[in-house]
Amino acid sequence: MQKAKISRHLSQRIAFGLFGLATVAVLIPVLFIIIQIIVNGAGTIDLQFLTQPPAQAGKAGGIFPAIVGTFYLMLGTVLFSLPVGILAGIYLAEYARDNRLTRLINMAILNLAGVPSIVYGLFGLGLFVLAFQFGMSLLAASLTLACQALAMIITTSREALLAVPREHREGSLAIGATKWQTVRYVVLPQALPGIVTGAILAICRAAGETAPILVVGAAFLLPGLPHSPFDQFMALAYHLYTVAAHVPGVPEGTMWGVALVLLGVVLSFNILATVIRLRVRRRRV
Amino acid sequence: MNVNYLLSADKKAPYDKVKLKTERVNLYYGSFQALRNITLDIPERAITAVIGPSGCGKSSFLRIFNRMNDLITGARVEGLVKIDDIPIYEDSIDVVELRKRVGMVFQKPNPFPMSVFENAAFGPRRHGKKSRSELEDIVKKSLQQAILWDEVKDKLDQPALALSGGQQQRLCIARVLAVEPEVILMDEPCSALDPVATLKIEDLMKSLAEDYTVVIVTHNMQQAARVSDMAAFIMMEEDRAGVLVEYGPTSQLFTNPRDKRTEDYITGRFG
Amino acid sequence: MLQRGASATAAEANAKRGLRRRRRLGEKFIESWIFLAGILAIVILLGIVILLLREGVPAFFYTSPWEFFLGTKWYPVSDPPTFGIMPFFVSTMMITLVATAIAVPIGVGCAAYLAEVASPKVRETVKPIIELLAGIPSVVMGFIGLMLLSPLVQSMFKLNTGLCGFTAAIMLSMMSLPIVVSVSEDALRAVPDEFRQAAYALGATKWETVRHVSIPAALSGITAAIMLGVGRAIGETMTVLMVAGGALAVPHSPTEPMMPMTAAIASGIGNAVRGGLQYQALFAIGLVLFIMTLAVNVIADRVLERQKRKFARS
């Protein structure tokens, strides 16, 4: 009897120990990668790096145009995907009737969020670059990234709205508020943190995406900054890819520097979203 | 009390004016019939209780009067439902305006996650009232009517969710009163509250009945006996459709019920 | 009974007018925008499908599906060009398989730890860090793989180059981990506590409960999590582009350089003549990828719905 009891507890300790090990195995890569990038890249970051354009085919100089290009991309993505995405999320959560068509639409959007980014690149190429004749441009790239972000923003907005309990809607309607008034004044304020978090995550993903813009508009070395949405542009993600995989002789420090800047931009948005989510949860409780 | 009414199958009210009327109303959820052939008149400025075992359709019946069933896909009402002799299930009726006239308080208190003031001011704001002083007057008046003013007058800007259960429910009642309804529907308003809070709300109901038509659904028979003037007993038949078994003055229904089923329910033989 | 006099009827008419349907134009205006946005979303969805079909299906007029899917020669510039995607398909499958084999035990184990063993404080600390992992852009992961991992793999397996399927698989497994952990953990936490209580009440240890009650109950959710991880691995582009080696032959082992489908599209599309045969063939690969990830996501979604329904009763 004693022996059986001991081995039961032993197997529990082994099993849970392995689980804990698995958790550590998940955490170590993250921390290791981030630390490596910081350590290796920090030395390269200085004011010149951040504010000067590249020289000697990317082997020297700075990455200012890439930073600007990434910024423009994020702006464009926000512009084209945020209003439509949130409104579509409101439509699906509050107005669409519960029938087969709606369920199909919901499923389609969910799956669209999982489509490979290169496929979005092809879509952008076929539609915006060629069919609409925007050419390889900032506009085409922003629209392409916006389509990718759209699926995610619709899904997160919809889920944030659906999470608001039914009783609040009933309470509002039962005293003679209209449907839109109920959405605007009761449901939306409660769903806002979730919507904002989803939007931030979708936008920062746009900042880090390379495959679509590879196909649709990014360039490696441009003489100046883009002046119109129809110009080509540089971007941090594309710059990193090119200097790491295609340009020989780029000093390692430069590559790590680019990685650090890109990571810094993306992760700060990520952390912002997490902070918002946690603060709201704490306030609710 | 005016006991001037027919003791036959006609279920008419003993008071002068009928506020709400149903004639042979059937309620369906898709193909399932929830209520069958309900005919009754609800008098003005009185408390009418709808009692019956759980699941028999009392809440569904209540929601007929403010068309909250419309929110459920597949819900369908047949028959005539009238307020002040105006049929309300017609395309020409504005549902939003109807719900302003016929307010509802729910079983579980559901104040909005806003301040006490904002909860009470919500209805008037949506109906166009903007000036701060006007809103303050309305809020004060509703909170007084809901017998909550003294307890919250210093806490108007604090979150409504910080109030106790009973206070939250009275706030929900104040929220309804603020839009100046004519009818107040209450769906088991005390079932989520403790006995002390329950008694406070029952007193509130009685004072409200002087100005409003109050219809309450309750599974608590003693409460119905304490509070209501008229009582309607609804029960489920074999096919799970709810029917009106008996309707009359509360005192008569409880002391001398005409239908055996009513008597069985009142004496606790099932429930 | 109501007295029906003339004044009463007039009053009634007035009352009815008060209840009559209002115009509420402002409401309709806003609602029409919301509706339009919904339509636009649907249009874009359809647009993607239609475009892929329009540009990709013509590829099958040139290459028969048989040759396309089973052919092992992808020579777009030979005369005549041949488009067989076997090398890409096998590469995708091989990398995905290895990545999944690494990610599943670690991911599910981590999820089990977070859901069943860890204290809330530990969970609150660990989860944001895992989400940080999800936030690292794929090009950065590719970069790390290139700079740090591939030399390691090269020396460990004595290869000519560390840019091979195995390196890619390791990086991909890291990228799948967040979603595997997240969905598995949700699945385990969705198992009602009553099940666990019943087991404890019968004298089971925590581990026995997890093993015999929680995990079996959450199995469909965990399966869905694995499928979503697989979908992620199949669709990943930049990491494999930078690290998998880019060789055009059908690989025989993960330690060879290889080119999965996503990388094939990315590297080829720059040179392809618009509207030409290679262009169409690349779109056809895109179509295949789209269908594969669609299938994986739909199945995972169905499985999750079923699990949600299973526990909705309680």
Image (cartoon, helix red, strand yellow):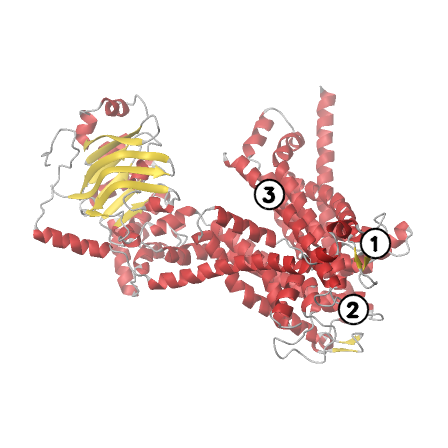
Can residue B233 be seen?
A: yes
Above or below, comparing residue C301 to residue A268 in the picture: above
Tell whether A123 sits left or right of C96: left
- Per the image, the residue denoted by label 3 is C186
Q: Quadrant of the N terminus of chain B?
A: top left
User: Does the CB distance between marks 3 and 2 fall below 8 Å?
Assistant: no
Which of discs 3 and 2 lies nearer the camera? The answer is 2
Which of discs 1 and 2 lies nearer the camera? The answer is 1
Residue C20 horizontal/vertical position (percent):
25, 55
Tell whether B74 sits left or right of C38: left
**The disc labelled 3 sits on which kind of residue?**
Asp
The chain holding disc 2 is: A
**The disc labelled 1 sits on which kind of residue?**
Cys
Q: Nearer the viewer, residue A4 or B151?
A: A4
The chain holding disc 1 is: C
Q: Is the same chain shared between marks 1 and 2?
A: no
Identity of the residue drawn at 24% across and 25% down: B262
Residue C100 horizontal/vertical position (percent):
73, 45
Quarter holding residue C221 = top right
- Per the image, the residue denoted by label 1 is C164
Residue C161 horizontal/vertical position (percent):
88, 57
Quarter holding residue C198 = top right
Above or below, comparing residue B65 to residue C175 in the picture: above
Real-space CA distance between mark 1 and mark 2, rounded to the nearest whole angstrom: 20 Å
User: Does the CB distance between marks 3 and 1 fall below 8 Å?
Assistant: no
User: Does the CB distance between marks 1 and 2 fall below 8 Å?
Assistant: no
- Per the image, the residue denoted by label 2 is A243
Real-space CA distance between mark 3 and mark 1, rounded to the nearest whole angstrom: 34 Å
User: For the residue labelled by badge 3, is the local secondary structure a helix, a strand or a loop?
Assistant: helix
